[in-house]
Image: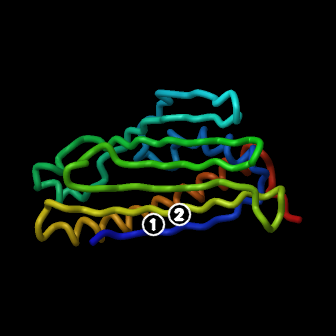
Amino acid sequence: MGVTVDVHQVFQYPFEQVVACFLRKYPNPMDKNVISVKTVEEKTDQSTGVIYRKRIAICQNVVPEILRKVSILKVPDIRLEEESWLSLQERNMAIQSHCLTWIQYASMKEESVFRESVENPNWTEFIQRGRISITGAGFLNCILETFASAFLRQGAQKGIRIMEMLLKEQCGAPLVE
């Protein structure tokens, strides 16, 4: 089965400021679930100028305690891998993330893009699609997917709120033109 969550947001800030803020977003006191984010690889393609980054995030296990009675869900933290390709020349950054925990039972993938807004070149458009599919948990598959869908949706909304707050703190009021 599986569930998909789509998010679209326009930040009224220039692309470079939004990307810089995104890369510094976590850890953050507004989201205590993200314990750490570490860049494990970074390189620049000399011919295109595209900057590739691979980061590993460690997050608290947010699966409800009642569901952690199932032994495979009893882990202290969840690991995520994020890969990004930043083109300052084209003013876009593509991001792919997936869960490294429970890979034999669940697939969690997110694809995101930050790009210059078509409405205003001083604004930045953010588009994200997250997909979660759970297998191998029998009758719990549907329950876990429902929980995961709600968590993914809430997480995306919280991430946008954090970005807006950090942008305002670091860059001032939005560019309303």
Q: How is the image coloured?
A: rainbow
Up/down of 114 relative to 1, above or below: above
Q: Residue at x 14, y 60 (%)?
A: 136
Q: Position of residue 158 (x, y in %)?
A: 52, 59
Quarter holding residue 140:
bottom left
Q: Residue at x 50, y 60 (%)?
A: 156
Q: Which residue is mark 2?
A: 157
Give amino acid for label 2. Answer: Gln
Q: Position of residue 73 (x, y in %)?
A: 18, 51
How many residues crowd mark 1 within 10 Å: few (<14), some (14–19), many (20+)? some
Q: Which part of the image, by quadrant, shows the C terminus?
A: bottom right
Q: Position of residue 115 (x, y in %)?
A: 70, 55
Check if mark 1's residue and mark 2's residue have beta carbons within 8 Å.
yes
Q: Which part of the image, by quadrant, shows the N terminus?
A: bottom left
Q: Residue at x 77, y 59 (%)?
A: 12
Label annotation for residue 153: 1
Q: Secondary structure at mark 1?
A: helix
Quarter holding residue 119:
bottom right
Q: Residue at x 43, y 43 (%)?
A: 34
